[in-house]
Image (tube, rainbow, N blue to C red):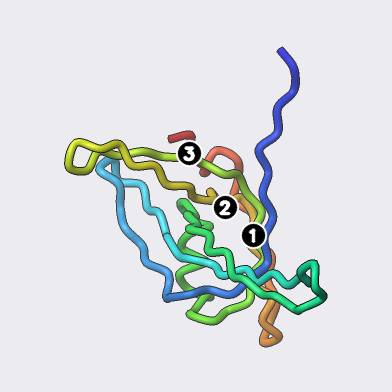
Amino acid sequence: MSPALNKVQIIGNLGKEPETRSTPTGKNVTSFSVAVNRRWKDASGDAKEATDWFNVEAWARLGEVCKEHLHKGSLVYIEGRMQIDQYEKDGDTKHFTKLIAGEVQFLDRKGQADVTAPQEEIPDL
């Protein structure tokens, strides 16, 4: 089997306060969205800007730390893996993409911290 890699790195700002919930099996997961701005010049030289939104999940202790220290607007670095989930709605299959965090660094100037989740805390869903 050939090697595979699913690694995502983003730096951006939280779009809302983190929310924590428990799964039916009792595991805690904290969810939040991160806005990543990108800038470029188009063919005519005009400056353009767009924002990409990432839905992020942090599990177990990593999620608890994110809930304690992150707030709307916080600047954060996240490293993890991309996961595509699906669900049924009105007979249609819907897909959504999320980033499962494995490492989070708080980049706000009021005290940078680096938190990494032990591999066993990141579930394969």
Amino acid type indicated by mark 2: Ala
Residue at the spot of label 1: 78
In contact (CB < 8 Å): disc 2 and disc 1: yes
Marks 1 and 3: CB-CB under 8 Å?
Answer: no
Which of 17 and 38 lies nearest the eye of the viewer?
38
Mark 2 vs 1, N-terminal side: 1
**Label 1 crowding class (10 Å Cα cut-off): few <14, some 14-19, many 20+?**
many
User: Helix or strand or loop: what does disc 1 sit on?
Assistant: strand
Label 2 packing within 10 angstroms: few (<14), some (14-19), many (20+): many
Q: Earlier in the sequence, mark 1 or mark 3?
A: 1
- Name the outermost residue toward the top: 1
Residue located 50% across and 57% down the image: 56
Q: Which residue is mark 2?
A: 101
Taking the spot 53% from the left edge, 73% from the top edge, the residue there is: 14
Task: State which tag comes first along the sequence, 2 or 3.
Answer: 2
The residue drawn where x is 54% and y is 51% is 99
Determine the image quadrant of residue 119: top right
List x then y, in percent, for residue 110: 67, 87
Distance from label 1 to label 3 (Cα)?
A: 17 Å
Q: Marks 2/1: CA distance?
A: 6 Å
Q: Amino acid at mark 1?
A: Ile
Query: In whole angstroms, how far apart are the C-alphas of marks 2 and 3?
Result: 11 Å
